[in-house]
Amino acid sequence: METIRKPLQGLWNVVRFNWPLYLVAGGAALALAGVGLAGPAAWRPYAGLLLALALLPLLVSLLVTAYAYDFSGLYRFDWLLKARPAPTAILTLSAGFDEISAPLAQHYPTASLLAADFYDAARHTEASIARARRAYPPYPGTRVVDTRAALPLPAGSLDLVVAFLAAHEIRDATERAAFFREIARALAPAGTVVVTEHLRDPANFLAYTVGFLHFHSRQAWLATFQAAGLRVEREVKITPFITSFFLRPNGSAA
């Protein structure tokens, strides 16, 4: 499934949504470079070392971001669609920035697709999400839902649920498990839930240093799925930095 994306759109989105971070980093780099070039001679070696220590993680994170979002095939969604029967009822879940509903609607034009956005400005206070919402309008017909309340869907009514780089925004483990229990309630016995995320693991630490703390660990996700009555049918490493969990209801046929 091809999506229409501009060159380096993923990298550009990350930079534009988090521009204050890069502005501060750039200012600090310029200050250190100034000290290294024109500061007291005794300070220059230390300024150069600090500059390298500051720029290397930033450069690595940008290169990894470009690879993961722009060159890895993540947005071709072959990993999602391979050997998958065509669903008739789809739910997509986003947290203020929906990149999955339009491609799925394009690929499954006869399916009923409900886009649900659980973004809550009072609890999801990251400025980057607010910037993303201003840059990209919601998918037409998107329904606002609350992760602490029941989904407006009958039990067993969904064939496919996709949470693409979004569910990590549910920071509280109890709330996350309750929300996934509600997803499992609305899932048909033969349905599938696909959760795609960065993980709090060594690869993402090397890529994003302390930024990897914004992600949940694999163990935390497995605990969430187990508490929700979902089992992992498949676990796919789309890149070393992004993982997709394909989930089925407990007790369903393999």
Image (cartoon, rainbow, N blue to C red):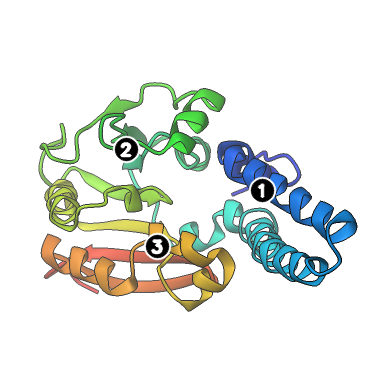
Q: Secondary structure at mark 3?
A: helix
Give the amino acid at mark 3.
Leu
Image point (62%, 54%), residue name:
69
Q: Is residue 124 above or below residue 79?
A: above
The picture quadrant where one finds residue 252 is bottom left
Q: Amino acid at mark 1?
A: Leu
| Residue that mark 2 sits on | 124
Res. 62 image quadrant: bottom right
Quadrant containing the C terminus in the rendered view: bottom left
Q: Is residue 98 above or below residue 61?
A: above
Q: Relative to 223, say whether 108 is above or below.
A: above
Estimate the spatial distance between the alpha carbons at disc 1 and disc 3, rounded to whole Å. 20 Å
Of the image marks 3 and 2, the number of the one nearer the N terminus? 2
Q: Which residue is mark 3?
A: 213
Judge by depth and name the residue closer to the eye, 172 or 1.
Answer: 172
Which of the numbered marks, if any, corresponds to residue 11?
A: 1
What amino acid does circle 2 point to?
His
User: Dividing the picture into quarters, in which one does residue 15 lie?
Assistant: top right
Tag 3 near tag 2, CB within 8 Å: no
Q: Position of residue 65 (x, y in %)?
A: 63, 57
Residue 134 is left or right of residue 142, and the answer is: right
x 10%, y 37%: residue: 150
**Residue density around tag 2, few if under 14, some if 14–19, many if 20 or more, within 10 Å:** some
